[in-house]
Image: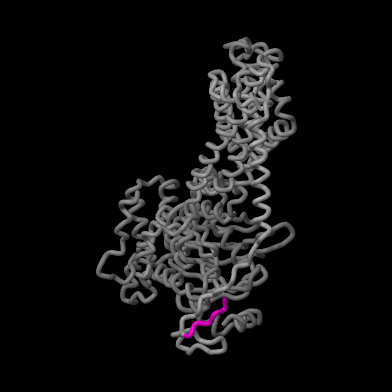
Amino acid sequence: MMSRDANRPAVGDTPPPGGSAEPSAIKAIRLRHPWRNVFAVVLILAFALFVIDAAQRPAYDWESVGKYVFDRRISLAAFTTLQLTVYSMVIAIVLGVVLAVMRLSPNPVVKSIAWFYLWVFRGTPVYVQLVFWGLLSIIYQTIDVGIPFTEPWMSFDTKVALSTFALAIIGLALNEAAYMAEIVRAGLLSVDRGQEEAATALGMSWSQTMWRVIIPQSMRVIIPPTGNEVISMLKTTSLVTAVPFSFDLYTRSRDISAETFNPIPMLIVASIWYLFFTSILMVGQYFLEKRFARGIGDRRPDRKAKGNDEVPTLTGALPESRADKPTVVLPPSKGDPPLNPGHGGRR
Amino acid sequence: MTDTTARGAASAQAVPMVLADCVSKSFGSNEVLKSISLEVRRGEVMCLVGPSGSGKSTFLRCINHLEVLSAGRLSVDGHLVGYREANGKLYELHPKDAAKQRRDIGMVFQRFNLFPHMTALENVMEAPLRVKGESKAVVEKRAMELLARVGLADRADYYPAHLSGGQQQRVAIARALAMEPKLMLFDEPTSALDPELVGEVLDVMKGLARSGMTMIVVTHEMGFAREVADSLVFMDGGVVVESGDPREVLSNPQHERTQAFLSKVL
């Protein structure tokens, strides 16, 4: 309400120029959004109906869901899926960074190799690639180490050297690396060019500039889509059946349902595990993002307290008589040393 | 030729810090620098002034090889920049050697270009640690001295985002000084600053000039040029139009183009 307090100046009154009168805080009736509430209520009701209905529907077979969700075979498969995700993502991220740096390298040979890699591995479906990796032992029966066209020093039987688990990881990782490379490249390009120039002007080499200056700053841009890729990878692992590798979460739960002739509860079981892992990954991403937001976040509160002690005025007023002393451009000496007392303990 | 004297037995004092001989630079068909010849002596403070697009910044960037010359010779402290001369032929330097040359040349940018993920102290320490490989204790001591010198000792643990523009630029100056350069290049160091912050940066530069540092300053601050510079070069359209004693040039410009420019900025 626009109730006018007696002690507040009337609308037309000009406050005294000294500004002694407090400006009156705005007291307005907030704009209502009645449709938001209606919509929310309708949605909640619909969802509640769905849940109540689902709880009673026999096809979901919640009893079996409860029975299998902690089944030893399922939890082992869930662990295998996690392993596939972590191993292939770690390889993919490392390889992706290397490929992205290669693509931005001044060396044209290195650049084209990276381009060719991306062309092949992004240009074919991951499922097809996984089938190919599964057939590796048929295409190349042995893996030879040595100089081409001479007797090899060492020779491995491909089938023995590479398990289907290893092939699944290789297949997932090499495909993912192509996507990671583009994510990393976007991150590297997002860093201001002045940063590279400043580092170069300081005499830093190209690789020092990359690892110390450009890559750390690009992490803020790289992490969110990488989190996306990890979650995506967790689910893509269900394709390793193409290798064929059959101990991952989805393939295992499908195999069990083939015995019980009851696929729906097993799908729910698998989904619960996938959701569980995804939720954990999202928490991890939150903390990573916080870590790399250094220098962007809020002002450090402990410093703000003594902010009124403004920076000592400088030096232009250096007496001419001292000009012959080369390094003396110290701030006008105050009683205490200008060193920051808290600074030693921080590192 | 110039570089024969540079490599000759002449005393070090005789070798100018920067010697530009017919320096030219083109970007495609756009000729940005047209045969610039000038000399900067040891301990000299030279101000480069002129309208934007006149090639001042490009010339500055050529000096530490951020830009590659199209023609001419440029040497710093008697050494050709970016090349090595043997048997009358020029050899392009390996990036490692080019980086080594840059260590001795400090540069301060218009937009500061501090590393935002490092504190002020880490910014100053980075290059001496990584490039020169000095010990951390030594570098940290020197970095704190330098921050004190630019009046920012109490801001050592601040990230650049939490410093004002003037403070950032002073950290940037300290960062360049940490490599103990023999030549400092300033590329419009105060152009991105609020007017009230310009003074604190100019004060640091004045102190640096008085300490005997050789400096080349691209600037629009004519007051600074008049007070501090030993020489002033007015550039326009990629050529040196007029040069000489700054007080002389500023108060009594000879060339019509200089008169027109100065009448607008003074």
Q: Is residue A3 magenta?
A: yes
Q: Main secondary structure of the magenta part?
A: loop
Q: Position of residue B132 (x, y in %)?
A: 42, 47
Residue at point 36%, 64% (across, down) = A305
Depth order, front residue of B7/A269: A269
Is residue A106 visible from the viewing direction of this image? no
Q: How is the image coloured?
A: one colour
Query: As displayed, is residue B195 above or below residue A67?
Result: below
Q: Is residue A215 above or below residue B105?
A: above
Residue A230, image x, y percentages? 59, 35
Residue A307: percent from left, percent from top: 38, 67
Which of A179/B68 is in front?
A179
Q: Which quarter of the figure has residue A120?
A: top right
Which portion, as a residue range, is magenta? A1-6
Q: Give percent across and percent down for residue A46.
A: 68, 44
Is B63 inside the magenta-drawn segment?
no
The answer to whether residue A31 shows anywhere in this view is yes
- Please identify the quadrant where the N terminus of chain B is shown: bottom right
A28, A139: nearer the viewer: A28
Toward the viewer: B20 or B119? Answer: B119
